[in-house]
Amino acid sequence: VIAFLDTQPCCVGAQEIHDQLRGRGEPVGLASVYRVLETLAQQGLVQRLDLGDGVTRFEPARTGEDHHHHLVCDGCGKVESFADARLETVIRDVEQRSGYDVAAHDVLLRGACGACR
Ligand SMILES: [Zn+2]
Ligand SMILES: [Zn+2]
Ligand SMILES: [Zn+2]
């Protein structure tokens, strides 16, 4: 599961992880995939994303170059990623002002994609 997630550019659902692993001939059950993902999430190695469509998605907790956020289309359900250095700067400013030691942050933009709008 970890090796598979590492090769993914963005978040994937447990069912899809399961299907892909099975497709590669890994004899893995869906229940074990969920169990592994829960454990990884608890350890902070994997980030859980709830995009509001009932599918919980997972992606490796990324720092540095691979750190990104998500755009979700309410029309077709498409998920895209984006990164913005200015956004990260603003979030660090907020961290300093608040006095919090911010361990992680999520930014989710939701609406209609270019094709749906
Ligand atoms: Zn992502
Ligand atoms: Zn759309
Ligand atoms: Zn960020």
Image (cartoon, rainbow, N blue to C red):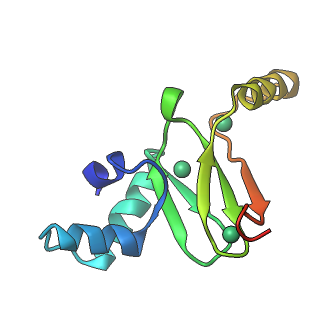
Determine whether 93 is above or below 66 in the image. above
Q: Residue at 68% across / 55% down in the picture? A: 71
Residue sitting farthest toward the front:
115
Q: Quadrant of the N terminus?
A: bottom left
Image vertical order of residue 99 relative to residue 26, above or below: above
Q: Which is nearer the eye, 2 or 113?
A: 113
Describe residue 82's horizontal placement relative to residue 92 as left or right.
left
| Rendering coords of residue 103 (x, y %) | 63, 35
For the residue pair 15 and 39, the one nearer the viewer reads as 15
- Image coords of residue 58 (percent x, y): 48, 58
**In the foreground, 87 or 94:** 87
Q: Quadrant of residue 67?
A: top right
Q: Quadrant of the C terminus?
A: bottom right
Q: Which residue is at 50% across, 28% downward?
A: 65
Q: Name the spot of residue 41 as percent of width and height, x first.
A: 47, 54
What's the residue at 76%, 61% (across, down)?
110
Q: Is residue 102 above or below residue 21?
A: above
